[in-house]
């Protein structure tokens, strides 16, 4: 297994992973999203690749603090293919911490939905040293 930067060739598998994450999408829509994301220098997408097949991904975004000096990295999307979970792939993807440190970030953060099917993911994050520290709010503008 190898962790590498995502490429345009990964779009079909990224679309599948987004669907598994609970956000059904088409390859066409994922291509538009990926191209927009890749054109923004604040974003970085990594994938877990086994024998040329993408089986996990982490979408990362760099942000600046208002309340502190420095920057942080937010994991804005994180998923491992359901057929490959509990094999250490997620832990390898979370090693995005190494990339975050190289960017000079002092913190890495993520949000995860408050849905029952995410309970295992929440425990996974806690086991990796993340703290359950905040409550998120969302307001749709559409």
Image (cartoon, rainbow, N blue to C red):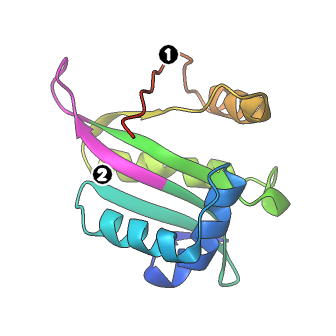
Please identify, in this view, whether the residue under mark 1 or under mark 2 is nearer the observer.
1
Residue 112 disc label? none
Q: Residue 31 magenta-drawn? A: no
Query: Compared to 42, does 16 lie above or below?
Result: below
Query: Residue drawn 52% across and 49% down?
Result: 77
Residue linked to disc 1: 135
- Residue 116 appears in which quarter of the rendering? top right
Query: Compared to 66, does 108 lie above or below?
Result: below
Magenta-drawn segment = 59-71
Left of 6 or right of it: where is 62?
A: left
Query: Residue drawn 63% across and 74% down?
Result: 13
Nearest the viewer among 124 and 136 is 136
Residue 102 disc label? 2
Query: Residue drawn 78% across and 35% down?
Result: 117
Q: Position of residue 75 (x, y in %)?
A: 46, 43
Contact? badges 1 and 2 (CB < 8 Å): no
Q: Position of residue 50 (x, y in %)?
A: 70, 76
Q: Earlier in the sequence, mark 1 or mark 2?
A: 2
Q: Position of residue 79 (x, y in %)?
A: 64, 52
- The answer to whether residue 132 is visible is yes
Nearest the viewer among 2 and 5 is 5
Nearest the viewer among 38 and 5 is 38
């Amino acid at each position: 297994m190898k962790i590498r930067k995502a490429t345009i060739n990964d779009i079909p598998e990224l679309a599948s992973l987004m669907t598994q994450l609970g956000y059904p999408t088409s390859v066409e829509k994922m291509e538009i999203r990926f191209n927009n994301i890749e054109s923004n220098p604040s974003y970085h997408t990594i994938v877990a690749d086994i024998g040329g097949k993408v089986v996990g991904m982490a979408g990362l975004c760099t942000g600046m603090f208002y309340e502190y000096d420095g920057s942080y990295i937010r994991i804005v999307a994180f998923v491992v293919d359901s057929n490959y979970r509990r094999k250490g792939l997620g832990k390898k993807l979370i090693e995005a911490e190494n990339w975050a440190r190289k960017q000079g970030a002092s913190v890495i953060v993520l949000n995860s939905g408050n849905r029952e099917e995410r309970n295992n993911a929440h425990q996974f994050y806690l086991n990796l040293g993340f703290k359950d520290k905040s409550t998120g709010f969302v307001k749709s503008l559409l």
